[in-house]
Amino acid sequence: MQLLISLLIIVATAAVVYAIIKTNPVKAKPLPLPSGVPYEPKLPDSAPVLHWSDGGRFMVEVMTESRYQATLQELAGAHGEQAAAAQYVATLMPDDRNAYENEAVAVFIDGRMVGYLPQKASLKFRELLRKKEAVGQLSTTDAQVRGGALWQGKRLQYVVVLDVEPLEK
């Protein structure tokens, strides 16, 4: 009889625990609220280990945000009403601390952040770094700041294009 009572207590306890788990699942911690300050990685002092080139084709466009337009306009220099095509060397930095995108690759010109490689391009670029045994290392490529022509009285946006082989195949 005592064995039956013990068994009933165990079954009842298990049922209560099961009911509690089902009605009160573990909730994920909420994401931190934005601080109002956009995330921007810092370019380390280390020297780039590779320089990429695709023969001057400039086929890879950097994802830029509106907050980089003032920087890009400064980099484009004076170009009147016509579109700019200012030549630079860009530094590509794998950004492992980016909370918004895995495998991000930040792009800098003259030490200033100008955007990121698109997600698919970042994945392929990091694959190329692994093949060259340069994981996490800085590298460079030729770049152009283009755009900014006047159209209907307004200045068009600027873009950055890189001279690396197409990365979104």
Image: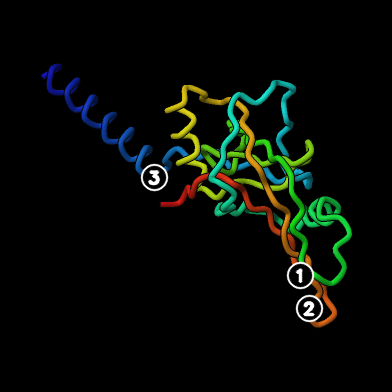
Q: Residues within 10 Å of mark 1 (few under 14, many from 20)?
A: few
Camera-near label (3 vs 2) is: 2
Compared to residue 89, the image places residue 56 above or below, namely below
> Label 3 belongs to which residue?
23
| Percent coordinates x, y for residue 130 in the rendering | 45, 27
Q: Marks 1 and 2, Cα distance to the nearest angstrom?
A: 7 Å
Quadrant of the rendered image containing residue 138? top right
Q: Residues within 10 Å of mark 2 (few under 14, many from 20)?
A: few
Q: Amino acid at mark 1?
A: Leu
| Percent coordinates x, y for residue 84 in the rendering | 77, 61
Q: Quick check: marks 1 and 2 in contact, CB under 8 Å?
A: yes
Quadrant of the rendered image containing residue 51? top right
Label for residue 105? none
> Label 1 belongs to which residue?
156
Q: Marks 3 and 2, Cα distance to the nearest angstrom?
A: 60 Å
Q: Amino acid at mark 2?
A: Trp
Please, what secondary structure does the residue beneath circle 3 have?
A: helix
Which residue is pictured at 74% across the width and 61% down the height?
Answer: 158
Question: Between residues 69 and 61, which one lies in front from this camera angle?
Answer: 61
The furthest residue to the front: 55
Compared to residue 115, the image places residue 41 above or below, namely above
- Left or right of residue 36: residue 92: left
- Left or right of residue 12: residue 158: right
- Left or right of residue 89: residue 123: left
> Label 2 belongs to which residue?
151
- Left or right of residue 118: residue 156: right
Q: Quick check: marks 3 and 1 in contact, CB under 8 Å?
A: no
Compared to residue 85, the image places residue 39 above or below, namely above
